[in-house]
Image (cartoon, helix red, strand yellow):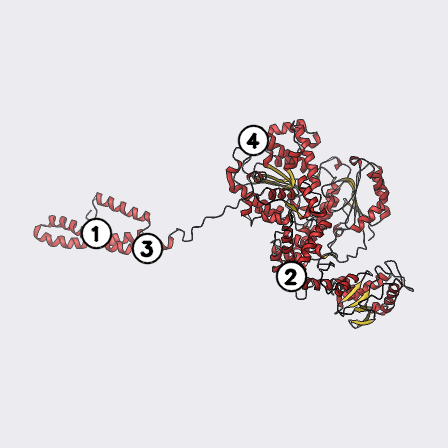
Amino acid sequence: MPNALPDGRRWAANLLGYGLSRLGVMHPESFDQGYRGGHEIGHIEGFAAGSAKGQTDGFEQGHTVGIEQGYGIGHKAGFDAGHAQGFDLGKQVLEIVDRRSRVAAVPGVDDRLFDAWTLPVDDVLREQVRCDVRDRLPGYKQPTEDQWKMIFSTTPSTCVVAGAGSGKSTTLVLRILLLHHYLGFELSSLTVVTFTNMSRRDFIGKLVDTFGLWGIHLSEKEARAMVCTFHSKILRFIGALPGTGRIVPFEFCGDGIAKAEEKVDRDDEDTLPFETRLSGGQFDLLNGAYSRLYEENERFRALMQILYQRSLTLRALDGNSEQAQKQLGKIKAISRRDAVCMEAVETIWREAGKWPIDGIEAKRATVRILDQSFQVHGKFENLGIYVVLGPERLPGEEFKRPGSKIELVREMGGKRTLFRAYCDVPVVWLSEPNAADEFLQWLANGASAAPGFNYQITGDLGTTNILECFVGAATFIENLGLDVPAAVAAMKLLPGDADREFFEALGLFWPAFEDFLAEQRPRVMTFNRMFALFGESSSRNMQLVPNAMLRSMAHLMIDEFQDISPQIVYWVRATLTEIRRRGRALHDGRRAQHSSLLCVGDDWQSIYGWRGSAPKFFTEFTSEFKASGTTSVMLRENFRSHQFVIDAAEHIVRTVGTIEGKKAYAAGPAANDPVPVEIHDRDDARIAELVQQHYDLGQTVMVLFRRREDGKEMKALLAELIRGDRRLAPEKQRLQLLTYHRSKGLEAEAVFLVGDCIHLTDSPYRNQAYLAAGLGTEDGDTPFDDAQREEILRLAYVAITRGIRHCYWFIDTSSGSEGRLKASAHVPRGKPYFLDQRRR
């Protein structure tokens, strides 16, 4: 063919074109167009040149030579033109389709808490363990298939949903046996965390006994080193740091620092976590910091003077509340009888020698509330604050004025509510005859000393000592993983909010208090401060923890995980992160390698949100504790109660969001012959009769109460039975009186619930703290209050599920909580597992 290239050139040209196309530096279509165009131009020019030359040298020779020369010239010219055009087009396309990243090359973050590994458990080992358990454990303690799934979990993280009575403790003991006895993991690499010291003692007993069945001697010391509470563990952490010296927890200082040191030495905890009721030694430390700050800080001194004066006046009440609106409808009647009520109270106070009071002008005056007249007994001479003598102590709760069938306390109670809701001036309501003495003396001394007084934060149920208010609010904030001054600074309080000065004072007091504790010898520190020192924002401190201490947390098992607080979650995650960071060197020469986390809990039993715990870390376990693999287990069998107790409790919490698939089934000895949970109006005589009846049958009995007042009444009601039971040896005692909260983890054949579970109050500052801690949702600004409405249902669930065979619920209908959410309102009609005998 006249336009064909020789084979060698054609092969070379194709190879060149293919290579350039693979490199992406030319556009193939442009190159082809240029090639064909150049070829055609070259051919024409070659033909013309060859034709002219052929006139001289001959057509054939000229034609041949012309083609060759013309092709060369044409190919070069065409290639140059085509290459230039194709290269320009190729550059444009290259800029469009180039897939090379133009962003900064920054490596990502591996935020998993564990290496990608699996526990070396094969079918042979599984069968061996199953056979050994069949041989050594009683038949009724044989694990279910779901329990075996927990025992044999091979992934770095394991989340176990274990409902009430699911046998989780025995299962957890067998998991430890697998790790230590069958896989050779050193005891020093294992830690089991229980929630309270009581549950710690119980678990240690089970562990020692079970190991003994396998011929393994586990000493008390070894067991105590492995089984601990969060608080005893963090105390070991901080004690292992080089150069820190001796540190004792503030929470141990109830009897002074010396006694606290003894508790540290004994590895002893006899207080519940986050306990805010303070004793003498703790008050001594608080008062030391308080007095010094009051003397040195002018702003703090001014704030405390404001709070002290305000503490004496009636606390404001929302005029739109049901309580206020109820009395508003009676305002005219209350005003008409006000003068005779005031005279009755004043007469008794005068006869008792408690009125008049020096510093208070004893002169009646009239104030107007919504166009109605009401009297006051006098006013503070130097402050101009009105005073009303309250009837609560004088003449007392039972007193009725002449001509009235209603107790004077109730008659004046309506006036008190109206003053709180609608009075525009501050009024001191003197419930105690000597309540104003300290205040007047303080004023007489020029307000020079730090005042002691009771205060009530909005949302709290009552007043308490101002220092306990500081501790309670600060502890709640810190349990959420927040810094107190920073949290206070982030608060947005409404204009005129009565707590503005309180939280400003708290922001000043708490750092000063912690500084004061640090000055003590030995140094004192709160548990929350210890956790914060090793949290996720304190990685440098974590790097100072010795290998041996860190290694003890390598394979961590946590019980009652639903009650964990954010503060402790951040410490656990920081610990696991540091274990992974140190890598193989941490485990060198040991059978136990890597790290793992096994958490056991039940979100339906999460009942400590009021102090800062949050079930979200359990319900959202896989996102909070990231791992290459997570085993999820649900223990549905209930070996404690019969089905009616289970169904009744689960019906109460049916509206509470929970982990999908939860439903418990009776599987223990009590499963036969279920009887319904009985609901009664409060009847103390009936309670005493039934308690005695079940006790005489030889059954274990538990009486649970919501309020301290109910507890006192139950102890008085059952005093004789209590004394008789206490004379028995501890293992033979069958009667317990506890709060609903303290009953968790316990059981009895007959359980008596006294009192409803009611959401009584809203807490603005706790809502803000929840939001700051990321525990809220985008569509709500009251996340704490919303959580508490669910928690009161979960608390009823916990109380009911203590019952093995019988559960009685006695509810006081006159609780003064009209309009508030109550757990008893969720008792259905027409269900076989409830027998509701209340008067409707």
Along the horizontal axis of the image, is 788 left or right of 539?
right
Residue 682 at what x, y percent from top left? 83, 50
Residue tagged 2? 297
Q: Which mark is residue 75?
A: 1
Residue tagged 4? 122
Q: Nearer the viewer, mark 3 or mark 1?
A: 3
Instruction: Give the Cα separation between the discs numbered 3 and 1.
Output: 23 Å
- Disc 2 residue crowd, few under 14, some 14–19, many 20+, Cα 10 Å: few
| Residue 472 seen | no
Q: Nearer the viewer, mark 3 or mark 2?
A: 2
Residue tagged 3? 91
Q: Residue at x 70, y 29 (%)?
A: 138
Q: Which amino acid, mark 4?
A: Asp
Q: Residue at x 65, y 27 (%)?
A: 215
Along the horizontal axis of the image, is 548 left or right of 391?
left
Q: Which amino acid, mark 2?
A: Asn
Q: Residue at x 21, y 52 (%)?
A: 76
Residue 323 appears in which quarter of the rendering?
A: bottom right
First in residue order: circle 2 vs circle 1? 1
Instruction: Give the Cα separation between the discs numbered 1 and 4.
Output: 73 Å
Q: Which amino acid, mark 1?
A: His
Q: Which residue reaches farthest left?
A: 56
First in residue order: circle 4 vs circle 3? 3
First in residue order: circle 3 vs circle 2? 3
Residue 752 at what x, y percent from top left? 79, 44
